[in-house]
Amino acid sequence: EAVVQILPEPVAQVTLLKGIPECALQALQAGGFCSIVQDSPNGSLTAWISRTHLPKALKLMEREGVQEIDPGLSWRVARFAPQSLLQPMINKATSSSATAATLSTLLNQANVRANFCSS
């Protein structure tokens, strides 16, 4: 049986201009959310990092080489996985693809903007 877990912390979408920043490493070490992907064709790095691990905006760019894509906009992260991998459970569902489809439909009906990414 699959479950969906909505992580409680807000997440920022950022462009990494100087490689992997210290704030991303700190998020990973602390068990916070961090996902980094390499965009094609230009090869730039995009990351989603929990806001609790991001420094203030000026330090973010100067010290870390990180630039928010949509400053101030926060994302929420949903994990879809077998029940045995996610503890504690938030909501149960019979399959992760069915759960994602249902969630997408509900958000659309509520006129909530949502983007689904996989990493």
Image (cartoon, grey):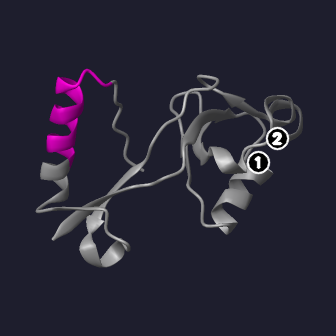
Reading the image, the residue beneath label 2 is 64
Residue lying farthest bottom?
84
Q: Position of residue 3 (x, y in %)?
A: 24, 63
| Residue 44 seen in this snapshot | no
Would you say 119 lies left or right of 32 here? left
Q: Residue 13: within the magenta?
A: no
Q: Amino acid at mark 1?
A: Pro
Residue at position x 66%, y 28% from top?
A: 68
Reading the image, the residue beneath label 1 is 21
Q: Residue 102: within the magenta?
A: yes
Q: With respect to residue 109, does 90 lie above or below?
A: below
Q: Amino acid at mark 2?
A: Glu
Magenta residues, dominant SS class: helix
Q: Position of residue 107 (x, y in %)?
A: 24, 31
* Residue contact between numbered discs 2 and 1, judged by CB atoms under 8 Å: yes
Q: Quadrant of the N terminus?
A: bottom left
**Magenta region:** 100-112
Q: Position of residue 116 (x, y in %)?
A: 33, 37
Residue at position x 61%, y 46% from top?
A: 49
Would you say 98 lies left or right of 107 here? left
The secondary element bearing badge 1 is classed as: loop
The secondary element bearing badge 2 is classed as: helix
Residue at position x 25%, y 70% from top?
A: 82
Q: With respect to residue 6, does 40 lie above or below?
A: above
Across the whole image, how many numbered discs are drawn on residues?
2
